[in-house]
């Protein structure tokens, strides 16, 4: 940029307009010393003054910066170039803004879907107490898919350790191998009249006679809870079978499906012992229907 050429051009235009340096300075709100400095090529007008200066001297900003007049054709071409550059810059900014908006909307939708999925998951999988029917019907094929039962009982109850669950359920899985004519207890779907209760030693002896292998750790579980076991609980009188069954099932429900560890804690060992000792079809139906989800309603 040639400051001397620009300064001489400004001086000539000022004189053509019959303006003094002070007159031009007053119009531009600068000092006359600033005008003198421009015209001597010692400086250049500030970019903020170019618009007012071009209007006062009746020339284009481009002509001031070149320090000479330009023909209309060149001025039009330059104006078109400036317009094209401005339009390209504006278009680029719009595209950037559009991309930013699309990305922001996409992120917002993703976060919303994630929160929705999380809330649905909480609603579907949160712990819910279950109530089950007092009476059952069905065939003998109830003791299946032990590993699946272990997973269900672990996720729904959380009362015992994994090892204890596996031991109890493995025992139940072994029970299905007993032939119908070798069952220890006579079976009636709706009464307990012929139920025989046995002690730990009797229980072990009779099953050994049937050549049924009982996992050793079952006795470790019994021993673990031995101090808490109320032995009189093993000799309930079920002669009034319907009412007794209802009492048993209510207690079983309260313990297993309230989800409060401290409630009915003292009855814990009784229920374990009853489930293990009483090789009777109703008891196994109760446990199996719970862990397999049969006959349950929320």
Image: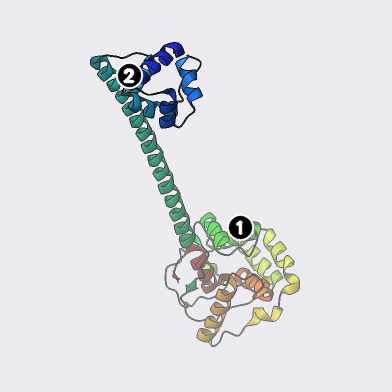
Q: Is residue 107 shown to the viewer in this render?
A: yes
Q: Is 20 located above or below residue 196 in the figure?
A: above
- In percent of width and height, residue 233 lies at 66, 80
Q: Nearer the viewer, residue 281 or 94?
A: 94
The span from disc 2 to disc 1 (Cα, nearest Å) is 108 Å
Q: Is 171 located above or below residue 255 in the figure?
A: above
In percent of the image, x 38 and y 37: which residue is there?
97
Say few, some or many: other residues with alpha carbon within 10 Å of mark 1 (under 14 / 14 to 19 / 20 or more): some
Q: Which residue is mark 1?
A: 166
Q: Is residue 180 shown to the viewer in this render?
A: no
Q: Nearer the viewer, residue 173 or 60?
A: 60
In percent of the image, x 42 and y 73: which residue is there?
137
User: For the C terminus, which image quadrant?
Assistant: bottom left
Dot in front, 2 or 1: 2
Residue at disc 1, secondary structure: helix
Q: Which residue is mark 2?
A: 16
Q: Is 279 located above or below residue 26 in the figure?
A: below
Q: Nearer the viewer, residue 30 or 187?
A: 30
* In this picture, residue 235 sits left or right of residue 19: right
Say few, some or many: other residues with alpha carbon within 10 Å of mark 2 (under 14 / 14 to 19 / 20 or more): few
Residue 52 location, quadrant: top left
In percent of the image, x 41 and y 11: which residue is there?
5
Residue 162 location, quadrant: bottom right
**Given the current orientation, which residue lies at the most extreme bottom position?**
240
* Color theme of the render: rainbow
- In percent of width and height, residue 218 lies at 67, 62
Nearer the N terminus, badge 2 or badge 1? 2
């Amino acid at each position: 940029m040639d400051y001397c050429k620009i300064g001489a051009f400004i001086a000539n235009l000022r004189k053509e307009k019959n303006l003094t340096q002070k007159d031009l300075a007053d119009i531009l709100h600068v000092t006359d010393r600033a005008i003198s400095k421009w015209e001597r090529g010692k400086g250049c007008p500030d970019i903020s003054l170019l618009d007012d200066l071009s209007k006062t001297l009746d020339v284009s900003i481009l002509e001031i910066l070149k320090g000479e007049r330009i023909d209309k054709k060149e001025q039009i071409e330059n104006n078109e170039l400036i317009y094209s550059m401005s339009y390209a810059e504006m278009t680029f900014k719009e595209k950037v803004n559009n991309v930013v908006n699309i990305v922001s909307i996409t992120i917002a939708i993703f976060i919303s879907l994630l929160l929705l999925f999380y809330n649905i998951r909480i609603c579907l999988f949160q712990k819910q107490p279950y109530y089950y029917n007092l009476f059952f019907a069905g065939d003998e094929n109830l003791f299946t898919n032990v590993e699946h039962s272990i997973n269900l009982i672990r996720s729904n109850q959380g009362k015992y350790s994994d090892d204890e669950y596996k031991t109890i359920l493995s025992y139940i899985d072994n029970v299905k191998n007993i032939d119908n004519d070798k069952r220890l207890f006579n079976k009636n779907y709706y009464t307990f009249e012929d139920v025989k209760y046995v002690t730990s030693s009797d229980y072990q002896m009779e099953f050994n006679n049937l050549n049924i292998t009982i996992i050793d750790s079952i006795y470790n579980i019994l021993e673990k809870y031995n101090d808490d076991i109320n032995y009189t609980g093993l000799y309930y009188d079920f002669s009034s079978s319907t009412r007794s069954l209802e009492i048993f099932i209510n207690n079983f429900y309260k313990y297993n499906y309230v989800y409060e560890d401290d409630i009915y804690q003292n009855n814990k060992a009784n229920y374990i012992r009853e489930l293990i000792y009483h090789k009777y079809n109703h008891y196994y139906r109760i446990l199996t229907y719970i862990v397999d989800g049969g006959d349950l309603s929320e």
